[in-house]
Image (spheres, rainbow, N blue to C red):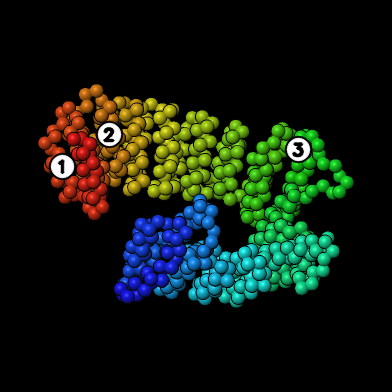
């Protein structure tokens, strides 16, 4: 091994001598490079190879290349690159080749190799790296796309990109993304070829060998890809994605029209088709000769007309395709337009009315999804339509009896409208809902009660909630109960609540920290109480929470009635209880605290 390492170091000497001779590095720096290089070479020549050693080697060489580049810029010397940088680049490529051969499945390693070659190597070398990577990772469409894009955009080789896409599609004949990117590539190539031809024609130059076939210039190849792909990948979503790509290219108007017509013919039964066709009305510009609206009012009127045309399409859609999904598209459109800012009062009122009508119609047909009932109620509440909001909420809870969200919305309406019998409605909700799902409702009830009812009533609700909600869901309730007790009845009340809950597991660390904080806020803070709270907390969390032990030690040291002599015993208890990393963290924090304390 030593001979191999010595040989590789000797291979470096010519480039290192050049670095010193031209003044980029000092003699001492060259010696340091040799020492570091020897260590790195030793690591990658060992019998038991480690991937991190190869990565560290590469990173060191990249840092060296960048340092050389910076120093060249500083002194303005740009010669001898073949002897210096190219030598380092070839060496790094050799390390990458070894690493990628050893850890073939590591995609990130291959991508690092590609990134390096993009910056430092020649295009021909990078092309070989892509070929080697794809030979192993042919099952990853994203890598095929990356390679094809590079061939097209960096090597300017549309033919190589085309061949890569064709090979990729043999491996992945059902991959929508491959077809989309292949389609885009052919359109980009056609556009580029058309521009080149125009430039040559302007300059009255003969294109000669650059003459491009007519089928490429007209986008015929892209059209073939489109036809093949939609015969394999079914569905309006894919079809729309190709249309969106085609619309980026002005020369492809005929192709856009063909795709659009096919979309309406092939996917009439898909809500996405109708959604796309309707929204397209917003993008249709005025015909030549028609004047653009000049004033804000005229613009609002024109926008109102466009939205009416959109809604006419949606109205036809929900008759042709009366499904929940179609109504969802229609209502989403109405909500989007309503949330658009406008200074026109009449346009805003039209949008609101249109949205409300769409909600009502979908509800009457029983084709309104649960989430959109929530959106409807929120919209009604926002405009203080409490009566209709309650009617909708009642209808929603009848349709979705076991939905916590719907009951929450109904109760929110009742609270906002200051209904007198809210408690009865909370009780009604619990009849229909599973106990483990009711935490949000209990929290809503307690929060409402805190602002609207007496302390006795609120406490009764908290006690009911603690009995009804079990397991991990009860933890936030206990914290809220303790908080409320302190806010409403002071420390004495909080301590009573803590005592009543102290055996009612599970807890959280914050539950205990709250009562500790409440004690410390008292004028006569009792150390005996703090010890009681810390001991209770440590009984639950002493094996995992190092901070509790540290804080306990601090209290004994800093409290006027603390016993510093107890700290040693607390320390050894902590060391016995804490496990794994928690023990290490505790030791480190304790050492820091001792140093600061001293």
Which mark, by number, is residue 3?
Answer: none
Check disc 1 and report the residue beneath it. 570
Which mark, by number, is residue 515?
Answer: 2
The residue under the point 52% across, 64% down is 81
Indicate which disc, 2 or 1, sits on the residue closer to the N terminus.
2
The answer to whether residue 121 of the structure is visible from this angle is: yes
Dots 2, 1 in contact, CB < 8 A = no
| Front: mark 2 or 3 | 3
The residue under the point 47% across, 68% down is 87
Q: Tag 1's secondary structure?
A: helix
Q: Position of residue 567 (x, y in %)?
A: 15, 39
User: 10 Å neighbourhood of mark 3: few (<14), some, or many (≥20)?
Assistant: some
Question: Of residues 480 and 42, which is closer to you in this image?
Answer: 42
Q: Is residue 176 left or right of residue 45?
A: right
Q: Quadrant of residue 456?
A: top left
Check disc 3 and report the residue beneath it. 300
Indicate which disc, 1 or 3, sits on the residue closer to the N terminus.
3
Spatial CA span between label 2 and label 1:
21 Å
The residue under the point 44% across, 32% down is 448
Spatial CA span between label 2 and label 3:
59 Å
């Amino acid at each position: 091994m030593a001979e191999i390492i010595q040989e590789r170091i000797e291979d470096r000497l010519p480039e290192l001598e050049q670095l010193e001779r031209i003044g980029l590095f000092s003699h001492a720096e060259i010696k340091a490079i040799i020492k570091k290089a020897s260590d790195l070479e030793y690591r990658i020549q060992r019998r038991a190879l480690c991937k991190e050693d190869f990565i560290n080697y590469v990173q060191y060489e990249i840092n060296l290349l960048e340092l050389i580049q910076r120093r060249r810029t500083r002194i303005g010397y740009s010669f001898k690159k073949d002897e210096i940088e190219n030598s380092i680049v070839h060496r790094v490529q050799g390390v990458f080749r070894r690493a990628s051969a050893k850890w073939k499945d590591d995609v990130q390693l291959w991508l690092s190799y590609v990134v390096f070659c993009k910056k430092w190597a020649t295009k021909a070398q990078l092309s070989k790296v892509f070929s080697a990577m794809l030979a192993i990772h042919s099952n990853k469409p994203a890598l095929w796309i990356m390679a094809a894009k590079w061939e097209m955009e960096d090597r300017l080789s549309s033919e190589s990109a085309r061949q890569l896409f064709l090979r990729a599609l043999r491996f992945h004949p059902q991959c929508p993304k491959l077809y989309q990117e292949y389609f885009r590539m052919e359109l980009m190539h056609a556009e580029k070829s058309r521009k080149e031809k125009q430039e040559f024609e302007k300059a009255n130059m003969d294109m000669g060998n650059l003459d491009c076939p007519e089928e490429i210039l007209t986008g015929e190849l892209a059209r073939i890809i489109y036809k093949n792909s939609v015969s394999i990948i079914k569905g309006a979503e894919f079809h729309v994605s190709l249309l969106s790509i085609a619309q980026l290219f002005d020369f492809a108007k005929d192709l856009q029209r063909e795709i659009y017509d096919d979309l309406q013919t092939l996917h009439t039964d898909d809500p996405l088709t109708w959604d796309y066709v309707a929204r397209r009305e917003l993008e249709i510009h005025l015909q030549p000769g028609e004047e653009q609206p000049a004033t804000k009012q005229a613009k609002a009127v024109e926008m109102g007309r466009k939205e009416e045309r959109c809604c006419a399409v949606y109205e036809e859609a929900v008759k042709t395709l009366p499904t929940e999904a179609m109504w969802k598209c229609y209502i989403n459109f109405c909500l989007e337009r309503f949330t658009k800012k406008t200074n026109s009062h009449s346009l805003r009122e039209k949008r609101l009315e249109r949205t409300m009508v769409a909600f009502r119609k979908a509800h009457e047909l029983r084709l309104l999804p649960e989430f959109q009932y929530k959106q409807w109620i929120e919209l009604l509440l926002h405009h203080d339509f409490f009566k209709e909001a309650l009617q909708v909420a009642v209808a929603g809870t009848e349709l979705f009896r076991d939905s916590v969200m719907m009951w929450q919305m109904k109760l929110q309406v009742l609270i906002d409208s200051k209904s007198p019998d809210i408690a009865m409605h909370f009780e009604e909700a619990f009849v229909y809902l599973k106990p483990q799902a009711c935490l949000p409702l209990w929290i809503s009830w307690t929060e409402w009660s805190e602002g609207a009812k007496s302390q006795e009533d609120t406490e009764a609700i908290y006690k009911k909630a603690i009995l009804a909600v079990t397991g991990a869901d009860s933890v936030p309730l206990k914290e809220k109960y303790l908080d409320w007790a302190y806010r409403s009845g002071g420390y004495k009340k909080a301590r009573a609540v803590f005592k009543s809950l102290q055996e009612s597991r599970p807890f959280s660390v914050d539950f205990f920290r709250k009562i500790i904080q409440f004690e410390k806020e008292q004028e006569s803070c009792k150390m005996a109480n703090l010890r009681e709270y810390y001991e209770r907390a440590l009984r639950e969390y002493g094996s995992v929470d190092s901070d509790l032990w540290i804080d306990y030690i601090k209290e004994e040291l800093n409290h006027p009635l603390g016993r510093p002599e107890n700290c040693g015993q607390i320390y050894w208890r902590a060391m016995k209880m804490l496990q794994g990393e928690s023990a290490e963290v505790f030791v480190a924090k304790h050492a820091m605290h001792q140093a600061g304390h001293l």
